[in-house]
Amino acid sequence: MSAVLMNYEQVRTLLKQRFPMLMVDQVLELVPGERIRTAKNVTGNEIQFQGHFPEHAVMPGTLIVEAFGQSASILFSQTTDLGLAPGEFLVLGVINDMRFLVPVEPGERIEIEVRILKLAGDLALVEGLVTVGSTLVARGKLGFARRTLGRAAAD
C-alpha cells in the first residue's frame, strides 16, 4: 500500500462535493501540473448499491467517471500554471473514449491515475486509468473548460 499524501479530511477541503457524491478518499501521489494518483474504497453500504444492482452490486460507470473527474479537480487545484482567478474553476465538458473493462464491486479499492495531456487557454484535457489491484477496470479522457461563478448563471 502506498503512502498517503492527503487523507479524506484534506481531500474534502479541495472538493465541493459532499455525501453521497464525494468519490475520492485519499491522494497517494501528486505532481502538480502533471499527474495525480488517488484512491476510493468502495463499500457495500453506499447508497448506489440499493439499486445498482440489488442482486449483484456493481459500482455505476458514472460514479467511476465522477471519481476520475474529482481526481482531476484535485490536480487542477494544486497546479498553479492554470492561472485560475478567484471565482474561476474548471468544469467537466467532454468524456472521450471512456471504456469500462471489468466491474467494480463493494469491498474493492479503486485507484485512479490522471495525467494532464494538454493545458491550452480555457481548456484542459486529461487521460486516466482506473485499477483495482493490478487489474485495469476503466480508462478514458476527460475535457474541462474554465468557467466563472457569475458567468455560469448568465450562460
Image (cartoon, rainbow, N blue to C red):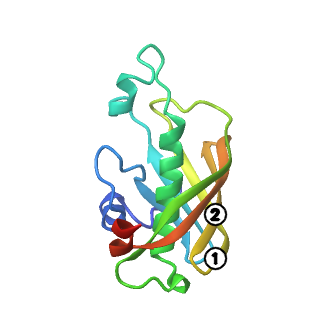
Q: Residues within 10 Å of mark 2 (few under 14, many from 20)?
A: many
Q: Position of residue 19 (x, y in %)?
A: 28, 47
**SS label for mark 2:** strand
Q: Residue at x 34, y 72 (%)?
A: 149
126 to 80, vertically: above or below:
above
Q: 75 or 132, which is in the foreground?
A: 75
Q: Residue at x 50, y 86 (%)?
A: 83
Q: Name the residue type under label 1.
A: Leu
Q: 134 or 91, which is in the foreground?
A: 91
Q: Position of residue 112 (x, y in %)?
A: 57, 53
145 to 45, vertically: above or below:
below
26 to 122, vertically: above or below:
above
In the orientation shown, which residue stands out farthest toward the front? 154
To which quarter of the image does residue 106 belong? Answer: top left
Quadrant in which the C terminus appears: bottom left
**SS label for mark 1:** strand
To which quarter of the image does residue 50 belong? Answer: top left
Q: Name the residue type under label 2.
A: Val
18 to 46, vertically: above or below:
below
**Left or right: 148 as drawn, with respect to 103:** left
Q: 146 or 18, which is in the foreground?
A: 146
Q: Residue at x 50, y 36 (%)?
A: 108
| Marker disc for residue 126 | 2
Q: Which residue is mark 1?
A: 119
Pointers 1 and 2 in contact (CB under 8 A)? Answer: no
**Left or right: 8 as drawn, with respect to 120:** left
Q: Earlier in the sequence, mark 1 or mark 2?
A: 1
**Left or right: 151 as drawn, with respect to 34:** left
